[in-house]
Image (cartoon, coloured by chain):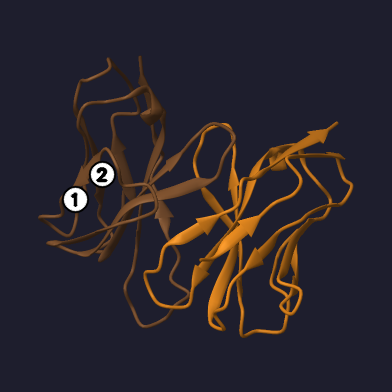
Chain colours: A brown, B orange
Amino acid sequence: NAGVTQTPKFRILKIGQSMTLQCAQDMNHNYMYWYRQDPGMGLKLIYYSVGAGITDKGEVPNGYNVSRSTTEDFPLRLELAAPSQTSVYFCASSYSGTSGRNEQFFGPGTRLTVL
Amino acid sequence: AQTVTQSQPEMSVQEAETVTLSCTYDTSESDYYLFWYKQPPSRQMILVIRQEAYKQQNATENRFSVNFQKAAKSFSLKISDSQLGDAAMYFCAYRRGTSGSRLTFGEGTQLTVNP
């Protein structure tokens, strides 16, 4: 299993540009999440999905969009990039079994800089 | 809303010594989980230890143990016999008991291990 994979690892954007951060998991997890981590801070939830076709906003959704057409993939779209979106982005997934102790597995992160 | 507070931005410990990282949280839920994650310079989020709120016994994982004080809403991490590889950012995190719930993170404690 590759676990949770993210591409790209690094990216520099100009203000106003758009891009899609890719996330995929091969563990057949129903739940997937996008977090951002600003310098010196903890992770904050941007969007999450409980299954294909179902997404919902987290704490900091402004400036982002997501879609979930398959169980495996959960891309994050940035429209009109702004310097405030400079951050490290983490994708995570978890199993949706009845046990609440199911942990979230994290991808390696994407470092995004908007100049 | 749930909040997680880590009041120690930085801590240091001598190799082979013991160090305790502090975390407090606020919630009105009775069913929840608490976690400590390690983030080394590689940025990968690594689960260190997990505590179920309904369990009175403190969780342990090799050199890592927690002191879970439910009434005080305190969840500290003790690292025994500290090793150079323990140097990292440590995040305390909270999650409701419902399967697939989001994680709420503290702001982190940067741990330095001195040889």
Residue A73 is labelled as: 1
B114 to the left or right of A56: right
Q: Is residue B2 above or below residue A19?
A: below
Q: Is residue A23 above or below residue B71?
A: above
Q: Please, what secondary structure does the residue beneath circle 1 have?
A: loop
Q: Position of residue B63 (x, y in %)?
A: 76, 58
A76 to the left or right of B57: left
- Please report, as a chain letter, where disc 1 is located: A
Disc 1 residue type? Answer: Asp
Q: Residue at x 33, y 69 (%)?
A: A95
Q: Residue at x 55, y 45 (%)?
A: A42
Q: Please, what secondary structure does the residue beneath circle 2 have?
A: strand
Whichever of callouts 2 and 1 sits on the residue coming sooner in the sequence is 2
Residue to which mark 2 is pinned = A23
Disc 2 residue type? Answer: Cys
Q: Position of residue A65 (x, y in %)?
A: 20, 44
Q: Are marks 2 and 1 in contact (CB under 8 Å)?
A: yes
